[in-house]
Image (cartoon, rainbow, N blue to C red):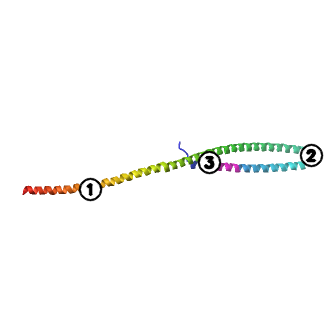
């Protein structure tokens, strides 16, 4: 299973938070509409109260209006119940995001501490060891230069001795012929 990079995790969390913000905005719109409905309902009830004496003769009409009002109240209760349910789900989601964010913060702190320890190890151990190896290579390089110089001197001497030996061989051969 491939591990998700920290940036991708942050992008996923940011996307989830953006979705939640959208849901909250929609929820606010629903609440505003609900408040508007309440205002309209209050207005209708006030009209019913002011016209109550006038409507005594029309009791049958009032009963039918009352039945309609009950239906609307039941529908309103149903809407409020759904709204409360949605808010509860939203609260659960926010809680989960908070927990995920806390976990992410802990992971980031751990990662930061690990990076700091790694930097300290590099500075204190690795860089020092590299310096020791470099110093050792410098000594070896100097010795190699010295050995190369000695080898070149030895080759020069061997070449000179070869030339002298050839010359002596030629002189001996000339003496033998004479």
Secondary structure under the numbered disc 2 in the rendered image = helix
Distance from the alpha carbon under mark 3 to that under mark 1: 74 Å
Label 3 close to label 1 by CB (< 8 Å): no
* Residue 153 falls in image quadrant: bottom left
Along the line of sight, which residue is nearer the eye, 30 or 160?
160
Q: Are marks 2 and 3 in contact (CB under 8 Å)?
A: no
The residue drawn where x is 87% and y is 43% is: 63
For marks 2 and 1, give the CA distance.
135 Å
Which mark sits nearer the N-terminus, 3 or 1? 3
* Magenta run includes residue 6: no
* Sequence-first disc among 2 and 3: 3
| Label 1 Cα neighbours within 10 Å, binned few <14 / some 14-19 / many ≥20 | few
Identify the image quadrant of residue 161.
bottom left
Secondary structure of the residue carrying tag 1 is helix
Q: Which residue is mark 2?
A: 56
Q: Nearer the viewer, residue 152 or 75?
A: 152
Image quarter hosting the C terminus: bottom left
Closest to the camera, between mark 2 and mark 3, is 3
Residue 59 horizontal side relative to residue 106, left or right: right
Q: x%, y% of residue 166?
A: 16, 56
Residue 120 image position (x, y, % from top left): 52, 49
Quickly name the residue at label 3: 13
Which label sits in the foreground, 2 or 1? 1
Q: Which residue is mark 1?
A: 153
Q: Horizontal and vertical percent for residue 14? A: 62, 50
- Indicate which disc, 2 or 1, sits on the residue closer to the N terminus: 2
Q: Is residue 18 magenta?
A: yes
Q: Residue at x 41, y 50 (%)?
A: 133
In whole angstroms, how far apart are the C-alphas of marks 2 and 3?
Answer: 62 Å
In the image, the segment drawn in magenta is 15-25
């Amino acid at each position: 299973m491939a591990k998700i990079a920290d940036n991708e995790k942050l992008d996923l969390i940011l996307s989830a938070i953006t979705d939640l913000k959208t849901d909250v905005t929609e929820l606010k719109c629903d609440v505003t509409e609900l408040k508007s409905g309440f205002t309209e309902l209050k207005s209708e009830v006030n009209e019913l109260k002011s016209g109550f004496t006038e409507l005594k003769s029309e009791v049958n009409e009032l009963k039918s209006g009352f039945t309609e009002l009950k239906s609307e109240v039941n529908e309103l209760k149903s809407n409020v119940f759904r709204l409360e349910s949605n808010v509860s789900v939203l609260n659960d989601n926010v809680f989960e995001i908070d927990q995920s964010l806390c976990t992410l913060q802990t992971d980031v702190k751990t990662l930061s501490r690990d990076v700091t320890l790694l930097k300290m190890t590099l500075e204190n151990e690795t860089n020092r060891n590299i310096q020791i190896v470099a110093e050792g290579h410098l000594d070896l390089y100097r010795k190699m230069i010295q050995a190369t110089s000695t080898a070149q001197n030895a080759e020069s001497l061997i070449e000179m001795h070869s030339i002298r030996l050839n010359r002596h061989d030629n002189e001996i051969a000339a003496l033998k012929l004479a």
